[in-house]
Image (cartoon, helix red, strand yellow):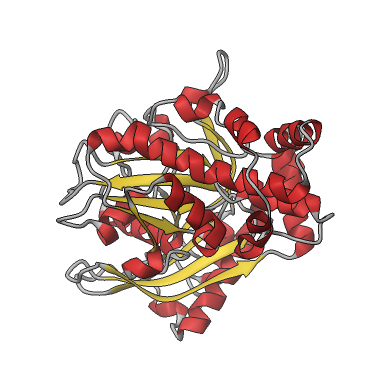
């Protein structure tokens, strides 16, 4: 069998980036042109989020919340998610008008099913991470080489294995005159600090999960609507309520907010169990539904503002905070962030000239590119890993039959 070749010419490379986020909404897929001679060196050709079918999303959410899920269910989800990711890759290429034969590779993050970094592992536990979305299924469906499983090497080196988008943030948003925080708000919120005129290796370039993002907001909107709503669209319900300050103060006592970076979190800390406690406390305090949602939305804003002051401002000035991800579509949340950070210009990625929804999917295309070039993908000052490392594992498609 002849070798499969991966085209990484010196000029432009067409790649696809895929990811399924902690919101469990669907697959985000992007076709991106990478050209290191250009500024910025990555350009979005097409982007789309392909929602999961309601039944599959419920199965995925239920499995993520069940600590006793069996091996058969995990194995099935791994292949089912691979199929969803493969379909998304095929469809986004079609919408971009790009033949799959012209795609050099696919960078797939998959779906984080479990993530226990070293600093959260209790005595006797082994730090580990598991991303589902079988890369062989994607490669077989598309005929394109797939780079996947980006977190494991960083974790093996003692790092958090997250966040992984900061390399892309540095590629796309470094500014010679402005210190910038790229604040992604997906299911979990994470921040990247890019100092003025930053370069790879700058010790003040840091990133970490700030805490809850949209995940708890969406879950509470679903709960108070009896399942009719999947989210608080445009923050309308939160805007109709008032933040309950005593409840917010209690929520801000969560120990994660005081933990120093490097750090990462997930649904294990900011998920269904915490939401159950919030709802119970709110009912005891006689906080009505729309005020609960306003308060949980304020928790996302307050926690990320607190992280900026506590961990980022000592490293350098914050001139801009650029909001990306689903949170950028919530004007109520944006107003709350701006109110909590009056000294900072708070803007969405669109105002910075980027598609903020596509940014994380672009990041995994860039990480795949770095892997195939034999270059580092992690940033030790971000993750706490002992060393720089190439991230990702390569799955080659079957050779076309002749």
Whole-percent x and y of residue 264? 47, 35
Residue 316 in the image: above or below residue 144: above
User: Residue 103, how many percent across, how many down?
Assistant: 40, 74
Horizontal side, residue 177 vs residue 400: left or right:
left
Of residue 311 and residue 287, the one placed in the foreground of this image is 287
Work out which residue is located at the far bottom of the displayed protein and give it. Answer: 97
User: Quadrant location of residue 370?
Assistant: bottom left
At 42% from the left and 57% from the top, the residue drawn is: 323
| Vertical placement of residue 194 versus 233, above or below | above
When asked about the image quadrant of residue 7, the answer is bottom left
Q: Is residue 262 left or right of residue 122?
A: left
**Visible residue check, residue 162:** no
Q: Is residue 368 left or right of residue 277?
A: left
Quarter of the figure with the N terminus? bottom left
Q: Farthest residue to the top: give it.
A: 123
Q: Is residue 170 visible?
A: yes
Query: In the rendered view, would you say 260 is above or below 380?
Result: above
Q: Quadrant of residue 345?
A: bottom left
Which residue shows up at 21% across the image and 36% down it?
203
| Residue 342 place in picture, x, y as percent | 37, 49
């Amino acid at each position: 069998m002849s070798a499969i070749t991966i085209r990484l010419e010196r000029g432009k490379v067409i790649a696809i980036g895929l990811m399924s986020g902690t919101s469990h909404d669907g697959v985000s897929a992007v076709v991106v042109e990478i050209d290191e001679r250009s500024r910025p060196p990555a350009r979005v050709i097409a982007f789309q989020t392909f929602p999961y079918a309601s039944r599959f999303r419920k199965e995925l959410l239920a499995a993520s919340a069940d600590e006793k899920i069996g091996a058969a269910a995990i194995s099935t989800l791994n292949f089912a998610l691979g199929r969803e990711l493969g379909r998304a890759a095929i469809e986004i290429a079609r919408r971009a008008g790009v033949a799959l034969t012209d795609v050099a590779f696919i960078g797939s993050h998959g779906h984080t099913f479990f993530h226990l970094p070293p600093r959260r592992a209790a005595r006797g536990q082994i730090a580990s991470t598991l991303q589902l979305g079988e890369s062989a299924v994607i490669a077989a469906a598309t005929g394109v080489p797939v780079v996947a499983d980006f977190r494991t090497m960083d974790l093996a080196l003692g790092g958090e294995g997250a966040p992984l988008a900061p390399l892309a943030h540095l590629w796309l948003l470094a500014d010679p005159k402005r210190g910038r925080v790229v604040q992604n708000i997906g299911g979990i919120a994470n921040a990247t600090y890019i100092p003025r005129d930053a370069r790879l290796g700058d010790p003040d370039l840091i990133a970490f999960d700030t805490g809850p993002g949209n995940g708890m907001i969406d879950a509470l909107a679903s709960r108070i609507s009896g399942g009719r709503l999947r989210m608080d669209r445009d923050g309308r319900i939160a805007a109709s309520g008032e933040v309950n300050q005593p409840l917010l103060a209690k929520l801000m006592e969560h120990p994660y907010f005081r933990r120093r970076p490097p750090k990462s979190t997930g649904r294990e800390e900011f998920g269904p169990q915490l939401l159950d406690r919030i709802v119970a406390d709110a009912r005891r305090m006689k906080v009505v539904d729309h005020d609960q949602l306003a308060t949980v939305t304020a928790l996302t804003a307050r926690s990320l503002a607190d992280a900026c002051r506590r961990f980022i401002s000592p490293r350098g000035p914050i001139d801009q905070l650029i909001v990306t991800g689903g949170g950028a579509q919530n004007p109520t949340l944006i107003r709350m962030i701006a109110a909590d950070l009056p000294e900072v210009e708070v803007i969405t990625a669109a105002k910075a000239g980027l598609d903020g929804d596509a940014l994380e999917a672009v990041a995994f295309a860039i990480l795949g590119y770095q892997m195939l070039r034999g270059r580092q993908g992690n940033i030790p000052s971000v993750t706490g890993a002992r060393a720089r490392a190439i991230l990702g594992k390569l799955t080659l498609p079957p050779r076309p039959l002749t």
